[in-house]
Image (tube, helix red, strand yellow):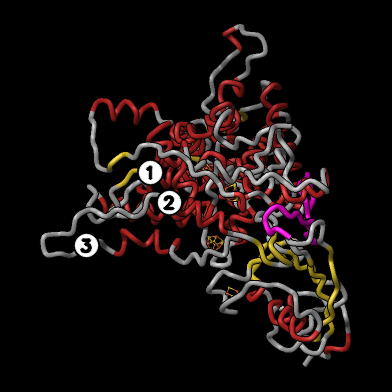
Amino acid sequence: MADKGSVVRLPVVDGLGRTLRKDDWWVGPMVTFTVLTAFVVYTTVRMLEGTHYRWGPYLSPLASPYIETEDLGIPLLTPAILVLPFPGLFRFTCYYYRKAYYRSFGLLPPACAVGARRVGHYNGERKLLVFQNLHRYALYVALLFLVFLWHDFVASLRWDGELGMGLGSVVIFLNCAFLTLYTLSCHSFRHLVGGSVNSYSEAPFGRLRHALWAGVSRLNVNHMAFAWISLIVVALCDAYIRAVAVGAIRDVRLF
Amino acid sequence: MADASASTTEPVSTGAKYTLRIWRADAKVEGSGEFRDYEVETYPGMVVLDAIHEIQAKQAPDLAVRWNCKAGRCGSCSAEIDGKPKLLCMTRMSSFRPNEPIVVTPMKTWPLVKDLVTDVSHNYRVAKKIPPFTPRPRDADGHYRMQQEDIDRIQEFRKCIECFLCQDVCHVLRDHHEEAEFVGPRYLIHLATLDMHPLDTLDRRKMMKDELGLGYCNITRCCTEVCPEHIVITDNGIIPLKERVADEFYDPLRWLARKLFPRTKKRRLPVLPGIEPAPAARSAQAQQEEVEKEPAVPPAPTVARRTPA
Ligand code: SF4
Ligand code: SF4
Ligand code: FES
Ligand code: FES
């Protein structure tokens, strides 16, 4: 028999979900799908609600920086609508979230060594998704937003001109801290501060850039964890401020 | 000491009987391919490759498996165990439960030759596509100089043993069969090694974008999950490459800066014509499809390129 041209059966063939894996590979993508969907639904509802973003000295991260929209007279426009596209795009183009939703929403692939969804012609990030390469611009805006958010934290400590602190400030502080960790562990930031250098010993500010790159690299290892924690903390922070604003719970004044 | 006989559902290292369910096929026998079960008794420290050697010695002398070092160094014994791409010699029998068969199959992505042996030569042709390391001239005293901090990053990539498990698991090759367009993770870290190298003088970024298919990778990280050398292929190799390509082709501000202050540090490469994948590079899926659709007709000796559905 000719060795070329013979055909043979294979233990596993193409097709969505086809695999010989025996573990519960679908749990991960399912959890990702559920949590991301819940977050998108929650923020969309809050974005359209258009109110209860502020209480006392607190400002929800969903509407920071706060821009009053009532006087503009544009129907359906809310302060959060003006804000959320920016952090939204930052997360949408984030290298980690891309992995998360390409797997759990795109099923390309749903899990490793599990058959991917069949698409007419798979293009990856070459055609429609080529805009993902602009992630760095979303990062620049996100860095600016960190300034606004930390400002909100400081502002949350002013009660009628006096220094004070409520539980809300603690929540806002946690939100700022995790968003900072998430933003500073970004892959594009890692590239920006030093990843693009080939020869640290020769490049201008090479030692500094190597040190910065090494520092961001240490954070970057945990980028996925920061992505999830900060996502949940943002939602909790907004939910807390809303609950206080509508009177469902009372803010605890610490001092 | 735990009593091994207490339970058969817990992994045991000594004396337990395991069933190995191995894919038996021969590319020379048309339409062949089936699972066959073999029973082996384990001893302490036994790995799946040992079990396969026992089967070869006592039950199936014609069972084909490729191996060399049995130490996780040569990258020859790649296969899939319970559906996961792994090295046969680095997977301990004690990590499985004896009451379930251990399913051992060849790598899915490459054409099957016999049993657990696949034809991975496509990878060697891909390697030839990549312009090799081209260092700058030596210093006046005849030496090359670079500092440890300059090469810390790329030393990680040099751990690669070319087992091609990352290539096997990558869905761009495994499911979408883009082997003519996409070099795959193993070669992306090779490109990262070259691109980050302090002495190298070539700029391969246009090539990476237009010819080597960097954009096909959707950073879903399966390559990183399977790498037996624990190389963080995606985060340390591919994403930095994507950022470097973005610097050159997708960043309007940098584009403007380059127009205003041109610099030429590295030599830009023209895009070279792509290599023709040889007939052996026919994807494994193409083999299977031929079995399913036209079992009697021998396949054409050309590359089976997938046509859009
Ligand atoms: S991260 Fe990219 S190269 Fe690695 S397996 Fe996924 S698609 Fe393939
Ligand atoms: S990068 Fe890792 S998985 Fe890929 S060929 Fe090298 S050692 Fe194997
Ligand atoms: S990579 Fe996740 S935020 Fe930039
Ligand atoms: S036999 Fe060498 S890596 Fe397994």
Q: How packed is label 2: few (under 14 Cα within 10 Å), some, or many (20 or more)? A: many
Labels 1 and 2: the sequence-earlier one: 2
Q: How packed is label 1: few (under 14 Cα within 10 Å), some, or many (20 or more)? A: many
Q: How packed is label 3: few (under 14 Cα within 10 Å), some, or many (20 or more)? A: few
Q: Give the label on residue B191, or none.
A: 2
Badge 1 and badge 3 both on one subunit: yes
Three-letter code for the amino acid on which mark 1 is drawn: Arg
At mark 3, the secondary structure is loop
Residue on which disc 3 sits: B145
Spatial CA span between label 1 and label 2: 8 Å
In this view, which residue lies farthest toward the bottom?
Answer: B1
Residue on which disc 1 sits: B204
* Quadrant showing the N terminus of chain A: bottom right
The residue at 68%/77% (across/down) is B49
Spatial CA span between label 3 and label 2: 21 Å
Q: Nearer the viewer, residue B206 or A249?
A: B206
Three-letter code for the amino acid on which mark 3 is drawn: Arg
Residue A57 falls inside the magenta stretch? no
Three-letter code for the amino acid on which mark 2 is drawn: Leu
User: Is residue B62 placed above or below A197 in the rendered structure?
Assistant: below
Q: Position of residue B145 (x, y in %)?
A: 21, 62
User: Is residue B295 placed above or below A23 in the rendered structure?
Assistant: above
User: Is residue B185 placed above or below A57 in the rendered structure?
Assistant: below
Q: Chain of mark 3?
A: B
Callout 1 touching callout 2 (CB < 8 Å): yes
At mark 2, the secondary structure is helix
Q: Is residue B204 left or right of residue B124?
A: left
Q: Nearer the viewer, residue A217 or A49?
A: A217
The residue at 49%/44% (across/down) is B275
Q: Which residues are magenta?
A: A1-22
In this view, which residue lies farthest toward the front?
Answer: A1
